[in-house]
Image (spheres, helix red, strand yellow):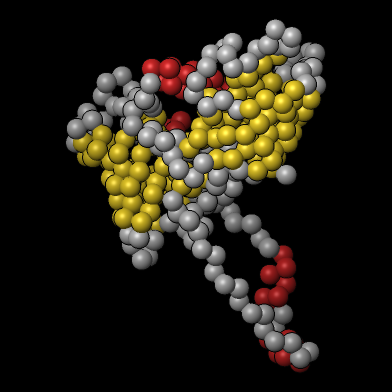
Amino acid sequence: MSELLSSYMMQSMARKMRARPFPLLDIALRRTIPPMHSGRCLVLLLPMAALLACGSSPPASSAPTTYNLTGNWEVLDPDPAQSLSSILHFNGALQFNGSTVTGTFLSIATNPTGTCPTFTTDLAVAGTLDASNNLTLTIPIYGGVATITATLAPDPQTFTPGSLQIAGGTCSMPASSINIVQFAPVTGTYFGMLTTSGRNPVKADITEVLVESTTPNSDGLFPLTGTMTIRGPCAETTPLVSETVSGNSIYLITGSSTSPVYELIGDLPTPSASSIQLYLDIYDANCSISGLQGFLNRQ
């Protein structure tokens, strides 16, 4: 991974963690209670005799949904504030081919100063998935081997509990609880209003037309292309420049504070990628705004 990418991702991660530390943890907790579908509950409460008396047939079962497991994944510690784990977080690309799994992850370590990898270190992933959806991933890591195990839910875009252990090496750790989840592609038209904080906030309407590549790059990041249209103090449409998606994060991986003129960092609050929490700075001779933030929703 290039020095420019490494520097920018470190700045991006620091900024995101200050503004919204560990954004997925509250979501993982909320999703332990499955939503109730009221229509289905009413049907279940009706006695079968009543249905037959009315001349109705039992509702036909729908065909099971087939999910594509290949894509963008994240592994995270459910309680980092209390964790003693040396690795809190993995994210990146996994490819599933029958029972074989391969991929590339990045990581967030509690001590990324030599004993554990920095979050710009590419980590090779290998593993298996059996007929019962039992997933096992292994990752060589600083002289040891990390092992992740979980039984995947029928919908991979659901937070699923599992275990992480690192045996041997300088980054070893005992078995620890994790959650693993796949994120849907960030593809579609997203719209929302961003505002700055303070006594006199600046507001801007943002429309993004986005396409996330289905093929990751060599770092396990998924390229993101499209356009961004701004209406407000600044009014123009501009293409995205070298954006990537990994786990729940969107990164700008090239450029500086003056080129391109838009510095964009985003989080995906839910695995469905139906919305983006966006942080946007605009550097332009005619229109300069720092600290725009808010949510864009897929239309």
Q: Residue at x 59, y 47 (%)?
A: 272
Residue 167: quarter of image: top left
Looking at the image, is 269 positioned above or below residue 137? above
**Residue 214, x across and y down, in percent:** 49, 45
Looking at the image, is 176 positioned above or below residue 110? below
- Residue found at the very far top of the displayed protein: 285
Residue 266: quarter of image: top right
**Residue 95, x across and y down, in percent:** 39, 49
* Label total for image: 0
Looking at the image, is 117 positioned above or below residue 215? above
Residue 205: quarter of image: top right
Position of the N terminus by quadrant: top left
Q: Nearer the viewer, residue 108 or 263?
A: 263
Q: Residue at x 26, y 34 (%)?
A: 141
Q: Residue at x 33, y 47 (%)?
A: 102
Q: Residue at x 46, y 30 (%)?
A: 81
- Asked if one can make out residue 29 in the rendered structure from this viewpoint, the answer is no
Q: Is residue 261 left or right of residue 65?
A: right
Looking at the image, is 88 positioned above or below residue 283? below
**Residue 123, x across and y down, in percent:** 31, 35
